[in-house]
Amino acid sequence: MNKVSERINRLAESATLAMARMSRELKALGKDVIALSLGEPDFNTPEFIKDAAKNAINNNFSHYTPVAGLDELRISISEKFKRDNNLEYTKDQIVVSTGAKQSLANVCLSLLNPSDEVLLPCPYWVSYSEIIKLAEGIPVEIPSSVKNNFKITASQIEEAITEKTKMFMFSSPCNPSGSVYTENELRDIAKVFEKHPNIFIVSDEIYEHINFTDEHFSIGRIDSIKERVITVNGVSKGFAMTGWRVGFIGAPLWIAKACNKIQGQVTSATCAVAQKATEEAMKSDPKSSTSHMKDSFLKRRDLLLSELNNIEGIKTNIPDGAFYIFPDVSYYFGKSDGETIISNANDLCMYLLNNCYVALVSGAPFGNPECVRISYAASEEKLLEASKRIKNQLANLK
């Protein structure tokens, strides 16, 4: 008998993790799967960060820490926010969590009441909508497409606001599109929220250091709305520290206290050793410690774009950040190889996985069902081979 809660029944499995699971299952059967589905840098954590973790172990950082994180870590995050983003957050306004995903969940659980609406610019990271639902809120999608570089406008936001709107959540650089909102675009968006003082803005900046424009702008810098902005960041992407599980927020003090309260009842603090490693990352100059990764990602982006643009029917934008391409593949909907009919992006992803062993993710759970997400956090050799397989396999669809 199925006795799980309705809460769990309403929750969808993470699409990215589901595709990773299916890829592993095929690999276990001996198939040569090229997995371009997960958002994980293929670099190793920098040595100076690993050394800090080793020192932490040797110095017996193996005990509980304050729920919000070690004081010295939160001070280093406060200094990072000021140095890199021109954001003013005190130590007490920072909460360190077990990854930015938990940070986002803490914020939603702290602010949302049943039926509160959260505006989501499409495309959005897959977990946003499910975290909102978990907090009993209602995700409200604001559409975009490859034609407008997957960015929404201030007027679209204005039109989507209702008396139930409680929050606006977005990422820049964006997962999955790689789009980056400019300072002017964010200032236009802020003007909308100036007229709606009861709406909170959650700015997910986890891909801050993988920004090919070199013009990362934090919306929390805008004075007129900064008291309603929650800035989310972490070390998983920019410092290749996905497995360390460290994310953090900078927020108004009362929100930080609420997140601390929730976290204290769910997980308490994240790993003490990982915190000491993150402290060292925060103290470093990101341009010197992470630029080699960004340079590699840019080279791979251009390589993969070149290959995709030689495949009939695929439409791409030019991502300005992160490490994804989010092509429109709707040209293939309704086509068939004589056995399989491609009705949607999920069908297309399964068709490619099962026939040429390339793992992508459907754009549907990101809010754009006409697209697929391709991660280029892989070697150039794998990207070239994956592109070749995709092109040859799609050629069978008529």
Image (cartoon, rainbow, N blue to C red):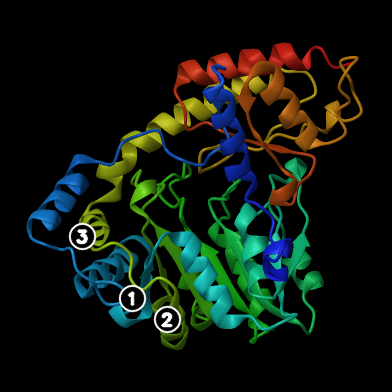
Q: Nearer the viewer, residue 328 or 52?
A: 52
The percent position of residue 30, horizontal first and vertical second, equals 54, 17
In the image, residue 246 above or below residue 96 = above
Mark 2 Cα-neighbour bin, 10 Å: few <14, some 14–19, many ≥20:
many
Q: Residue at x 34, y 66 (%)?
A: 81
In the image, residue 338 above or below residue 198 = above
Among the 4 quarters of the image, the one containing residue 194: bottom right
Could you tell me which secondary element the residue under label 2 belongs to?
helix
Callout 3 amino acid: Lys
Q: Which residue is mark 1?
A: 68
The answer to whether marks 2 and 3 mark residues whose Cβ atoms lie closer than 8 Å is: no
Q: Nearer the viewer, mark 1 or mark 2?
A: 1
Which mark sits nearer the N-terminus, 2 or 3?
2
Report the Cα–Cα distance between label 1 and label 2.
9 Å
The answer to whether marks 1 and 3 mark residues whose Cβ atoms lie closer than 8 Å is: no
Q: Nearer the viewer, residue 58 or 149?
A: 58
Q: Which residue is mark 2?
A: 256
Count of numbered marks: 3
Label at residue 276: 3
* Farthest front residue in view: 1
Callout 1 amino acid: Ala
The answer to whether marks 1 and 2 mark residues whose Cβ atoms lie closer than 8 Å is: yes
Q: Where, quadrant-wise, is the N terminus in this rendering?
A: bottom right
Please say whether residue 315 is visible from this viewpoint.
no
Among the 4 quarters of the image, the one containing residue 176: top right
Which mark sits nearer the N-terminus, 1 or 3?
1
Label at residue 186: none
Q: Nearer the viewer, residue 293 or 225?
A: 293
Q: Where, quadrant-wise, is the C terminus in this rendering?
A: top right
Callout 2 amino acid: Ala
The percent position of residue 72, horizontal first and vertical second, equals 19, 71
